[in-house]
Image (cartoon, rainbow, N blue to C red):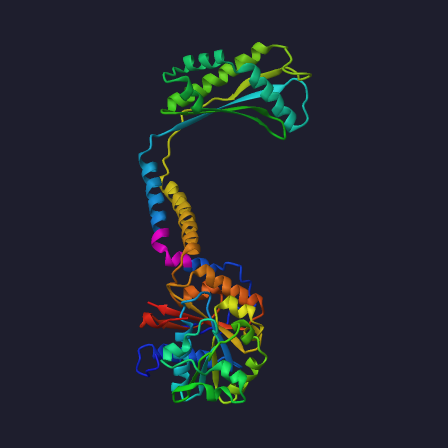
Amino acid sequence: MLDPAAPVRSHYEELAGNLLGIEGTGIVVVTSPDPGAGRTSVCLGLGAAVAGMGRRAAVVDCNLANSQLHRMIGEPNFVGLTSGLEDSKTLEHHGYEVLPGLLVVPTGPVLSDPASILENEGVPKALRHLQASRDLVLLDAPVAWGVLRSPNLSGSFDGVLLVVHASRTPKVAAREAADDLLAAGVNLLGVVLNGCT
Amino acid sequence: MTSSSGRPWRGGARDDTSLSEILYVLGSRRLLVVGAVLILAGIALLFGLFREPVYVAEARVSVEPRGKLDSEEARLAFLEEVRGSVVTQKMLDEVRRKAGWESTPEEFSERLDPETFAGRNGGSGLLIRFAGDEPGQASRVANAYAQAFVAGVDDLGDRPVADGVPVAEASVEQRAVPGGYRPRPLIYAAIAAGAGLLLGGAVALVLEGRASGWRGVRDAELTLKVSVLGSIPDYSPERTEG
């Protein structure tokens, strides 16, 4: 996925081009109707494609209840988003530069209720600060109902990207998620159809 | 392949099913739809070609009240009263005998279709249709029924048919003539094909609503009514956590 020669790279590049073509998409929340749609993979692949285009991207794991990002890059989860909320350093210092231009920030240690951490007023501030040095910040977020329950994730950033899996995501669930997001006033930027055959 | 049309779904009525959505579903399940059309049209064609011919003959009896009945409803009610008084089992036995009917009384009743009528500008009576296996048989029965009905009305004499309803006068206005049989297998097939299209289309839409898999970008856009910004092939299924 991070390999520029990977066969999926061209697809992620097309996705990156479409996403960057939408104005005002500095911080994008990536969610899905159900678990297992491939949000984390899409975040990493998309971030790698953006970095491969000579832009600067960051992927931040906001799925505090079920963090996956650090596992996918093979790094420990000792530092990350929660670390950035507790000290004065920016998130640039709490992530891993896995590729030139791609910063990956895990959740960091989650010692209290994940939902209350996400609603910390420092979260949007820290992410906006990170955005200042990045062309695109992707938030690997919980599933759609988790995003809707979080005022920070549903209302503090520039838009939401909905990932659906071609064989694992039921159509009904995807339609309900899209409807609920739009009904809540979320700026639904578009859909990524993952796992096509 | 991704959407190139920007974000076309915004502001639209998300619950509305568009024509393009229906056409897409029908197109993607065309085997089902075409199959339903062909099967029903084929059955109708065979039915039209090989069915036993049915000849329908029609006789018309005029029945007029002696007094004046203003409304159409009143005249129809009067005719029903007359029919109820005249048509008896005995009369039907007589009709069958005169027409040379050899099959069962039940089948006779199924093939017989008498209907009262009352025009707005006067003219009321009984229309007698009979569907026979031969043209002669159909007209014989229709005429026998018409004649028996007229005789039955004559037998009523001056007797009032109902409260305040005057006695009727009746005559055979039009005798039944042996008719031809025109099979229309192509018309049957065309109607059945239309029914097959509706049936196949309805089944396709129901199946689509229950489907869990996604066929592609167009399918996702039509289902979600949100632009698809990208599609990622399934090259590494083991790495799609989250």
Q: What is the x, y in percent for residue B56?
A: 42, 27
Q: Is residue B224 visible?
A: yes
Asked if residue A108 lies in the magenta stretch, the reply is no
When asked about the image quadrant of residue B163, the answer is: top right
Q: What is the x, y in percent for residue B230?
A: 41, 73
- Quick one: A80 or A112, which is closer to the camera? A112
Drawn side of residue B173 relative to residue B179, left or right: right
Q: What is the x, y in percent for residue B151?
A: 53, 12
- Quick one: B37 or A98, which is closer to the camera? A98
The N terminus of chain B, quarter of image = bottom left
Magenta span: predominant SS is: helix
The C terminus of chain B, quarter of image = bottom left
Residue B222, relative to residue B39: is it above or below?
Answer: below
Going 49% across and 13% down the picture, which residue do you hit?
Answer: B89
Drawn side of residue B11 relative to residue A60, left or right: right
Q: Is residue B1 visible?
A: no
Drawn side of residue A104 relative to residue B39, left or right: right
When asked about the image quadrant of residue B81, the answer is: top right
Residue A1, relative to residue B209: is it above or below?
Answer: below
Q: Which residues are magenta?
A: B25-33
